[in-house]
Amino acid sequence: MSGASIPYYLRPHKSVDRRLFLDLLTRFERWKPLAEYVYVSMGAYPLEDHKLVHRHLGITRLIAFDLEELIVARQKFNKPIETCHCLHKKSGELISDLDAILSACSFPEPEGLIVWLDYTSPGQLGHQVREFEALLNKLRAGDLVRVTVNAQPSALLEPQLPGAIPLLVTDKQERQFKNLKSRIGEFLPSETSPKNMTQEGLPLAISKSFGAAALKALPVTGDNIFCPLSIIRYADGEQMLSITGAIVPRSDRSAFLERLDVQSWPFVSTDWSEVHRLLVPTLTIRERLFLEKGIMSKNPVDLVAELGFGAASDIKMDEFLECYRRYYRFYPTLLSAEI
């Protein structure tokens, strides 16, 4: 089942990650207002992020795209406003034809762009890094980019045949590294090795690869820089990695970060090696209300003792609570209802 086909109420990690993105956009408005920006995203069939940026930021210039015609048809039905354009496009087509697409949608000279490339296929990782580079070459200072890619180590291996002898850990990592290197090529950091093919190491290697692509698109001799703002890994069936950043004038980087007050934001990443882990177990309403009441005043040990259980959704509660303290405001409230 692809990410686009999984119901959103079964994806709390994705929901929290999206709401953190929205919170980051509200901070960006301390630098530049976003109401006249164009928002471009794959969006999947529900167009949840399009609805959020419209409702919370007042953005009315919306573009959704997907390579599957059926998903685009559902997008057209679910679009939040009439000025949301739903296109049957591949991500590469959208990037190469970006100016023509903006004109065709009657958004020829936007104040700025917010583009979210939400990838799912791990086999196309190298292609995705190169599309990110190509996109940066199309954008201007003030534009924002968000990229989500698969960062699951096991996704770098072909499935073993039934009855095959399981690979040793070292052999598995060697194959994973070989496949990663063949996909990313020149962008893979030179210090990356088979030992990095872990849940922690792979997202870091991928993040630095996107950093290398950003540097190629916007070299140190240029006027602009791509400034990473948030890099988060989370489990959504498989481990995913979300990278969000903005193109800013090189001379304004320090003032930009100071205006956003990113150091007070719990998931800030101003360096490509700063990858945050997002832990989101499934909680009952009663569990959540109890945790919200005490998360800022009690330590995790005491909260776990009062809960009476040490794990939820295969996630240790003490590890989760350290993370939850930073994002509890964005945990989704999902209720069933009969209509």
Image (spheres, rainbow, N blue to C red):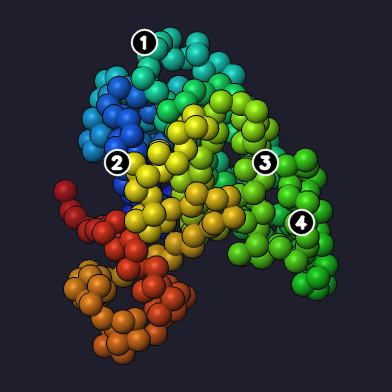
- Label 2 SS: helix
- Label 4 SS: loop
Relative to 253, is 175 above or below? below
Distance from disc 1 to disc 3, alpha carbons, whole Å, reads 34 Å
Distance from disc 4 to disc 1, alpha carbons, whole Å, reads 46 Å
Please name whichever residue, 308 or 188, is drawn nearer the observer in this view of the structure: 188
Relative to 94, is 334 above or below? below
Q: Earlier in the sequence, mark 1 or mark 2?
A: 2
Query: In this figure, which residue is indicated by the disc labeled 1?
Result: 106
Distance from disc 2 to disc 3, alpha carbons, whole Å, reads 28 Å
- Label 3 SS: helix
Residue at image position (81%, 53%) is: 178
Q: Earlier in the sequence, mark 4 or mark 1?
A: 1
Q: Residues within 10 Å of mark 1 (few under 14, many from 20)?
A: few
Residue at image position (16%, 48%) is: 339
For residue 26, which numbered disc appears in the image? 2
Q: Give the residue type that dot 3 points to.
A: Ala
Depth check, mark 4 against mark 1: the one in front is: 4
Query: In this figure, which residue is indicated by the disc labeled 3?
Result: 212
Q: Earlier in the sequence, mark 2 or mark 3?
A: 2
Relative to 284, is 227 above or below? above
Q: How far from the left and from the top, in percent, is residue 42? A: 46, 33
Residues at circles 1 and 2 in contact by the CB criterion of under 8 Å: no
Residue at image position (29%, 63%) is: 328
Distance from disc 1 to disc 2, alpha carbons, whole Å, reads 25 Å
